[in-house]
Image (spheres, grey):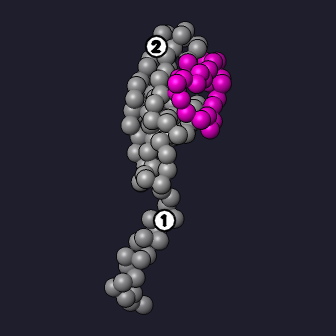
């Protein structure tokens, strides 16, 4: 069956919608901070999915040199484009932001994660 010329763009648009909005999202890395023992690296970034959503500060932690995921694995916030992270010890990561917390993992492989709402 031959498809009309108009149906190809419509079909492509439908496939794009089914794939989700990930291609519309971008991550801007704010900082990468290595743990004092050199084992882990924490990455703070701002996720932006376009004009219809708010900025989302996020944090991904992994082994040193590991590629970060599309979204944070230990922290996801909302309504802010500001975030700061710091290691206070090899097993303590602190997160600072003015955001609303959507998700936080408080223990990642023995590392304690804390959040402080900043102004």
Lateral position of residue 8 relative to residue 106, left or right: left
The part of the image, by quadrant, that contains residue 31 is: top left
Where residue 67 sits: x, y (%)?
43, 33
Which residue position holds label 2? 38
Residue 26, above or below 94: below
What residue sits 58% from the left and 31% below the top?
74
Where does the magenta region start and end?
A: 94-119
**Residue 106 forms part of the magenta stretch:** yes
Residue 46: mark in rendering: none
Q: Is residue 57 visible?
A: yes
Number of marks in the rendered image: 2
Element type at mark 2: loop
Q: CA distance from mark 1 to mark 2?
A: 41 Å
Q: Quadrant of the N terminus?
A: bottom left
Viewer-closest of 59 and 119: 119
Q: Main secondary structure of the magenta part?
A: strand
Where residue 57 sits: x, y (%)?
50, 35
Q: Which residue is the extreme one toward the front?
A: 119
Element type at mark 1: helix
Residue 17: mark in rendering: 1
């Amino acid at each position: 069956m031959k498809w009309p010329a108009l149906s190809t763009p419509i079909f492509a648009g439908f496939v794009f919608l089914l794939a989700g909005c990930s291609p519309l999202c971008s991550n801007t890395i704010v900082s990468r901070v290595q743990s004092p023992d050199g084992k882990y690296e924490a990455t703070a970034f701002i996720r932006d999915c376009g004009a219809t959503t708010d900025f989302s500060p996020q944090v991904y932690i992994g082994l040193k040199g590991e590629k970060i995921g599309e979204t944070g694995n230990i922290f996801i916030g909302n309504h802010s484009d500001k975030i700061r992270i710091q290691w206070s010890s090899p097993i303590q990561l602190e997160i600072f932001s003015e955001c609303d917390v959507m998700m936080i993992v408080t223990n990642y492989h023995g590392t304690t994660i804390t959040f402080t709402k900043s102004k």
